[in-house]
């Protein structure tokens, strides 16, 4: 059993809520997950001071692997020369030298792909073919029965809130690739509202339940949307041999701690070609 603490959209900067960050750190230290995922938008405007706040927050988390990926807010929107010439300079200096990365721990391989596209699609992002191949190689070099987890900031299917923007271009093609490489789940954020779907929303009629596509709301900012306006959220995800359990948690206005909501259980997707037989 693999336990993942899934957070996103810290938005350090003007929308950042220190009390929500304290609740996140308390929660993380109590849970002791195997891995923590922070699925992008660590900052609001990609400023040095904002990345320092994000870095300080990450350093307060327990000593387990923390997987991060840039979001569209982690590149400068208004500083046009910086966006054109060195959009990830502050990310690389203060968070990670890598934009795409892979991390292995016993029983699981994580691949984080940078979907921010500062020069072409500042809001709704891109994932490029070379990045899909990066993920494919990482998963192919991992043990056959590893859980395979992808982290991508942007969303793949329309969010419940119509103001959340269009999904990632090429989402259907990407879902086909992820199914073919035996991905077990995709973790993201961006829409500021918890949203759980599967790749069957993009590829109807195929065999199997599809790959879970799990968007986390905003964990530490005031930018919650739709049903999570004014609410902060995170997910506890348990990957078992035959199912993935998503347990959303919410921090209501005025509350001290994140509290669990109803669990969502999705049968584990297995493709016959890429993964072979059952896992675990
Ligand atoms: Fe975003």
Image (spheres, grey):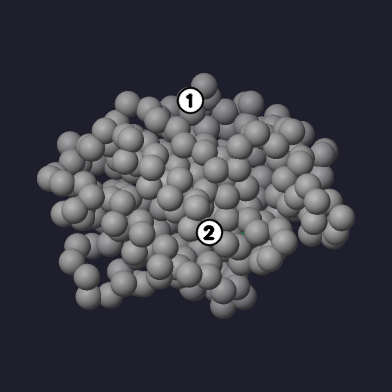
Mark 1: few, some, or many residues within 10 Å (few <14, many ≥20)?
A: few
State left or right for residue 90 relative to residue 264. right
- Residue visible at 50% across and 51% down? 131
Quadrant of res 236: top left
Q: Position of residue 194 (x, y in %)?
A: 49, 59
State left or right for residue 37 relative to residue 185. right
Quarter of the image containing the N terminus?
A: top left
The front one of 114 and 219 is 114
The front one of 14 and 101 is 101
Q: How many marks?
A: 2
Check whether the beta carbons of the residues at disc 2 and disc 1 lie within 8 A of each other: no
Quadrant of res 204: bottom left
Q: Is mark 2 within 8 Å of ligand 1?
A: no
Q: Position of residue 190 (x, y in %)?
A: 58, 59
Quarter of the image containing the C terminus?
A: top left
Mark 1 element type: loop
Residue 206 seen in the figure: yes
- Residue visible at 70% across and 49% down? 74
Q: CA distance from mark 2 to mark 1?
A: 27 Å
Mark 2: few, some, or many residues within 10 Å (few <14, many ≥20)?
A: some
- Residue visible at 53% across and 67% down? 168
Q: Residue furthest bottom?
A: 162
Mark 1 = which residue?
Answer: 64
Q: Position of residue 163 (x, y in %)?
A: 62, 75
Mark 2 = which residue?
Answer: 127
Q: Position of residue 231 (x, y in %)?
A: 59, 56
- Residue visible at 48% across and 58% down? 129
């Amino acid at each position: 059993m693999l336990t993942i603490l899934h957070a996103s959209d810290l938005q350090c900067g003007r929308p950042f809520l220190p009390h929500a960050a304290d609740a996140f750190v308390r929660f993380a230290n109590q849970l002791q997950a195997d891995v923590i995922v922070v699925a992008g938008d660590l900052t609001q405007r990609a400023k040095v001071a904002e990345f320092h706040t994000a870095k300080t927050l990450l350093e307060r988390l327990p000593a387990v692997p923390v997987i991060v990926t840039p979001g569209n807010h982690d590149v400068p929107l208004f500083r046009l020369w910086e966006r054109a010439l060195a959009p990830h300079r502050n990310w690389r200096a203060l968070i990670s030298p890598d934009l795409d990365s892979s991390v292995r721990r016993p029983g699981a391989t994580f691949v984080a792909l940078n979907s921010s596209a500062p020069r072409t699609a500042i809001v709704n992002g891109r994932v490029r073919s070379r990045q899909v191949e990066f993920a494919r190689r990482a998963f192919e070099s991992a043990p056959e029965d590893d859980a395979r987890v992808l982290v991508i900031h942007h969303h793949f299917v329309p969010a419940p809130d119509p103001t959340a923007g269009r999904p990632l271009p090429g989402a259907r093609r990407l879902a086909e690739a992820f199914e073919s490489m035996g991905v077990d789940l995709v973790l993201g954020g961006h829409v500021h509202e918890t949203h759980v779907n599967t790749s069957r929303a993009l590829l109807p009629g195929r065999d199997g339940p599809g790959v879970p596509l799990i968007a986390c709301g905003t964990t530490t900012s005031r930018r919650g949307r739709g049903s999570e306006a004014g609410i902060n959220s995170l997910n506890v995800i348990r990957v078992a041999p035959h199912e993935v359990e998503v347990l959303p948690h919410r921090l209501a206005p005025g509350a001290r701690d994140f509290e669990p909501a109803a669990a969502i259980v999705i049968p584990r997707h297995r493709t016959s070609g890429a993964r072979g037989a059952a896992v675990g």
